[in-house]
Amino acid sequence: MYKMIVCDLDETLMNDDGTLSAKNTAAIKAAAEKGVFFVPNSGRSYTSFQNDLETMGLRNQPHQYSISYNGGLILENAGNKPLAVNAMPYELAKGVFEAGVADERAATHVYTQDKLYIYNPVASDSAYLENRGVTFEVMNEPDFSRFKDMNIMKIIMALPTMADRKAMRAAAEQRVDASKLAVTYSSDRYVEFNPAGVNKGSATLQLGKLLGITADEIIAAGDNGNDLPMLNAVGLPVSVANGIDTVKAAAKYVTAADNNHDALAEVINKFVL
């Protein structure tokens, strides 16, 4: 019996327009009523999906949980209480940020525990974020010292092509020790940097341990490269139909539906209800 579902949001649970479908909502509520935890496991901040948790009936609920920042933060939904904070060391984050600033095409995002800052925002990226309820503060100067006393969860860059994103990874790894980084790609737009050992999979297992749930009792659903660690960590890895090839290859089940056609309801109805 599966006791927990960890699920990516964008391009997995959510429609392309950033909305949550009625069928997915109903399936999540039915799973929760059966005692199965439904845990958003997103690269985004928890602040950006509070309205979606409200729709699911999970907002501000005790004994319900969320994972943000590719595993950087695990919360209990009641009061958004931090259970684990897996932040980046300041100097590591600073080096990655400097690589982003050096590329004038990159929109460089700095995620602190509660807020997103963007240096050099670009219109297409800003529109993508705003469509998903993500708010941010524009950094007018590349002064990283403002983050000295904050928890830095991750640094990411929006760039137009995968070749650009891979080049950014190489540039960052020239500035800092590559062995100290966990690097992933997401949403066909981002290269994402977390501290080594921190990813959606490690956080899934952290939360499972806190709840007494084993890896074999967990379903993970995703679509993109930053979802691979959680798919590789659990008993039932699932790719939605629109998942990239490497995600489909890692999955034990690939949905018939894509994210715009209630893929998560398909998973929950098949394996939980």
Image: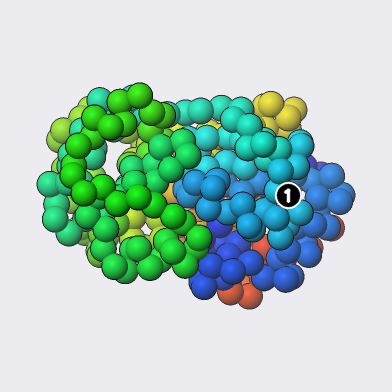
Query: Of all residues shown, which one is farthest toward the right?
Result: 34
Residue depicted at 49% across the width and 46% down the height = 45
User: Residue 46 or 190: which is nearer the viewer?
Assistant: 46
Residue 157 image position (x, y, % from top left): 28, 51
Residue depicted at 73% across the width and 63% down the height = 25
Left or right of 84 on screen, residue 169: left
Left or right of 76 on screen, residue 26: right
Q: Quadrant of residue 88?
A: top left
Colour scheme in use: rainbow
Left or right of 48 on screen, residue 51: right
Q: Quadrant of residue 256?
A: bottom right
Q: Mark 1 is on which residue type? A: Leu
For label 1, the residue is 58
User: Residue 116 or 223: which is nearer the viewer?
Assistant: 116
Residue depicted at 80% across the width and 57% down the height = 29
Residue 273 image position (x, y, % from top left): 84, 58
User: Circle 1 — which element?
Assistant: loop
Q: Image height check: is 202 above or below 167?
A: above
Q: Image height check: is 253 above or below 208?
A: below
Quadrant for the N terminus, please. top right
Residue depicted at 39% across the width and 52% down the height = 136
